[in-house]
Image (cartoon, rainbow, N blue to C red):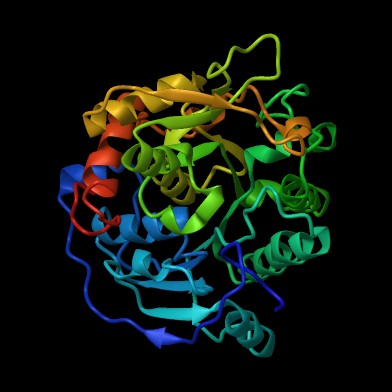
């Protein structure tokens, strides 16, 4: 298979899904910040995936539009369930999409915005050639196509490009070569960032360095889903959560720190930057505050009405050299573009996710407080 726009093998076919999106309440659209016109039309690769499907749902519910073409590979997991509540013009399987673009640049009509969120997102994938074909090659092809057709191009880079953080996590830095990703996934993302910079169009597009995103529609990701999703299932089955021990003297067990961000906030930031025409380059997408694993898991027990029980287990030796003990996004650059949507406090975000989606077995767009 040539291309993977969702993080694994799959197949599908083009279908048309009709239906008008309900107009959202004005106060909800205002709270989410971004402004789009009724003439705007959107392409979303990876649109059945985690962040992609929530973005499609946000366009439906927050902005009242279904002028969307979704590109993805559904495979054999339950990712298709993410699409069930959503409204869009057409679903196109990834290989077919690129084949048709190669035959005719205007095969799918005109778009005002292209969200390229499709990729192989596995941080443990070892096939570097596979990662480069998908995460670098497809990004380069789609960016050049979008720019040639006058579309706003917004793509998923990754905080994994920063490596262990020793060279900083500054999205204002132009020295992209200073960072050393810890895995092939991070390198495949960095390669396109540097390519766009070298070719002189990075400031004409928007690259999103997502930090630790969690929330509805991630269940299909298996081992790559968030600790919130994994912990909820562990607690339900065993009554406890297993976390990796720390192997760093500065961080106690459970004290390793990450910048956790609710997917609803991540999508609000993404849509804001898409609508902010003067924004360009790389942007950190995070909460701006590092929190510990313990601060993340305790609200899960509370939301489930359980007493906290945590067991610390050995980290696989293969993971230890590439493990990040601290990540924190500086979102000053994002705020400088006018983003005023705020960030959902971590305990509130975890409670919303667990109670409205995981315990209720709902997806984003099912009307569970979206």
What's the residue at 49%, 76% (across, down)? Answer: 110
Frontmost residue, 239 versus 150: 239
**Residue 1 x %, y %:** 70, 79
Frontmost residue, 325 versus 113: 325
Please determine whether, in this image, residue 300 is positioned above or below residue 9: above
Left of 284 or right of it: where is 21?
left
Give the mark count.
Answer: 0
**Residue 335 x %, y %:** 47, 29
Residue 197 visible (yes or no)? yes
Please determine whether, in this image, residue 243 is positioned above or below residue 8: above
**Residue 184 x %, y %:** 78, 49
Residue 31 visible (yes or no)? no
Frontmost residue, 256 versus 35: 256
Q: Quadrant of residue 6?
A: bottom right
Residue furthest to the top in view is: 250
Q: Quadrant of residue 105?
A: bottom right
What's the residue at 35%, 67% (across, down)? Answer: 81
Left of 312 or right of it: where is 42?
left
What's the residue at 32%, 41% (across, down)? Answer: 236
**Residue 149 x %, y %:** 60, 72
Residue furthest to the left in view is: 25
Residue furthest to the front in view is: 238
What's the residue at 49%, 34% (across, down)? Answer: 337
């Amino acid at each position: 298979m040539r291309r993977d726009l969702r993080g694994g093998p799959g197949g599908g076919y083009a279908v048309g899904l009709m239906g008008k999106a309900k107009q959202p309440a004005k106060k909800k659209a205002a709270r989410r910040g971004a402004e789009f016109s009724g003439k705007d039309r959107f392409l979303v690769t990876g649109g059945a995936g985690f962040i992609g499907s929530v973005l499609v749902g946000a366009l439906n519910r927050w902005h009242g539009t279904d002028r969307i073409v979704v590109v993805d590979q559904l495979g054999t997991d339950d990712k298709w369930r993410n699409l069930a509540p959503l409204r869009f013009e057409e679903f196109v399987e990834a290989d077919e999409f690129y084949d048709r673009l190669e035959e005719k640049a205007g095969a799918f009509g005109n778009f005002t915005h292209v969200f390229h969120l499709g990729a192989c997102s596995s941080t443990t994938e070892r096939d570097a050639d596979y990662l480069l074909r998908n995460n670098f090659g497809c990004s380069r092809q789609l960016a050049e196509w979008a720019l040639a057709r006058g579309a706003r191009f917004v793509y998923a880079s990754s905080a994994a490009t920063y490596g262990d953080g020793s060279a900083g996590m500054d999205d204002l830095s132009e020295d992209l070569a200073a960072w050393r990703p810890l895995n092939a996934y991070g390198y495949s993302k960095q390669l396109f960032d540097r390519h766009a910079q070298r070719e002189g169009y990075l400031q004409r597009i928007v690259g999103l360095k997502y930090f630790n995103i969690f929330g509805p529609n991630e269940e299909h990701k298996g081992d790559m889903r968030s600790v919130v999703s994994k912990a909820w299932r562990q607690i339900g089955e065993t009554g406890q959560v297993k976390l990796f021990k720390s192997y760093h003297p500065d961080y106690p067990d459970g004290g390793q720190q990450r910048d956790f961000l609710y997917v609803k906030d991540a999508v609000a930031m993404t849509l804001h930057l898409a609508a902010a025409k003067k924004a360009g380059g790389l942007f950190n997408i995070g909460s701006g505050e590092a929190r510990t694993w313990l601060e993340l898991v305790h609200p899960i027990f509370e939301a489930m009405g359980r007493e906290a029980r945590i067991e610390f287990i050995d980290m696989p030796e293969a993971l230890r050299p590439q493990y990040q003990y601290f990540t924190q996004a500086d979102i000053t650059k994002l705020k400088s573009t006018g983003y005023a949507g705020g960030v959902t406090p971590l305990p509130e975000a975890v409670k919303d996710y667990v109670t409205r989606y995981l315990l209720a077995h709902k997806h984003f767009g099912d009307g569970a407080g979206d």
